[in-house]
Amino acid sequence: ASLTVFSRVTAQNADMPRIMVVVDEKIDDKDATARKVAGKIENAFLAKGYRLVDKSQFESVRGRDLALGDLNATKAKELGRRFGAELIIAGGAQAVFGEERETYGIKNVEYTADGEVKVNITDTGDILAVASATAKKSSQGKSQAASKALEEIGETLANDLVAKVEKNLK
């Protein structure tokens, strides 16, 4: 029933739904400054013609406020109204130091990342799709290895979500 309500909304607008992406990204339990995962998800949806809620509008909404278990139907509806989003993509991602290895005199640092996000329809609060991913990346520097790992899960989550959302909105 919720999907018919949603398709009616999109038919009236004749343009794509507005999405809001809020992902709490951490590296070694500290807030990540770059939005690697959110950026990959936003770009994937933009490429499909979806409209984004301007990030500066919701800077005050932190990813941790919308951690996976915390985004309920009421909160989704409220955020949808407040920011004009029809879909909210929220979740968390973290990269954690794995190990340091030396190969032929070159030190390499390994990071493991994992993340999970879900897509909520704001007018009903229903969950439209859920995706999770893990990745392991190594590089000569810690920040580069962590960054690569987050980018990889961002890519995986983005592709998975776009496919699931497109299928479920049909």
Image (tube, grey):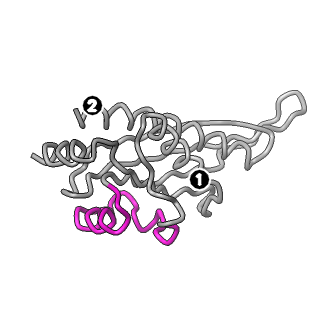
Residue 46 is situated, as x and y percent measured from the top left of the image, at 47, 40
- Asked if the stretch drawn in magenta spans residue 74, the answer is yes
Q: Quadrant of residue 79?
A: bottom left
Q: Amino acid at mark 1?
A: Arg
Residue 124 is situated, as x and y percent measured from the top left of the image, at 18, 56
Q: Amino acid at mark 2?
A: Lys
Q: Residue reaching furthest right?
A: 105
Give the residue number, with chain letter if any, for mark 1.
35
Q: Residue at x 74, y 48 (%)?
A: 142
Question: In front: 97, or 93?
Answer: 93
Q: Is residue 55 above or below residue 41?
A: below
Give the residue number, with chain letter if any, for mark 2.
167
Q: Residue reaching furthest bottom?
A: 60
Secondary structure beneath disc 1? loop
Q: Quadrant of residue 22?
A: bottom left
Q: Residue at x 38, y 64 (%)?
A: 83
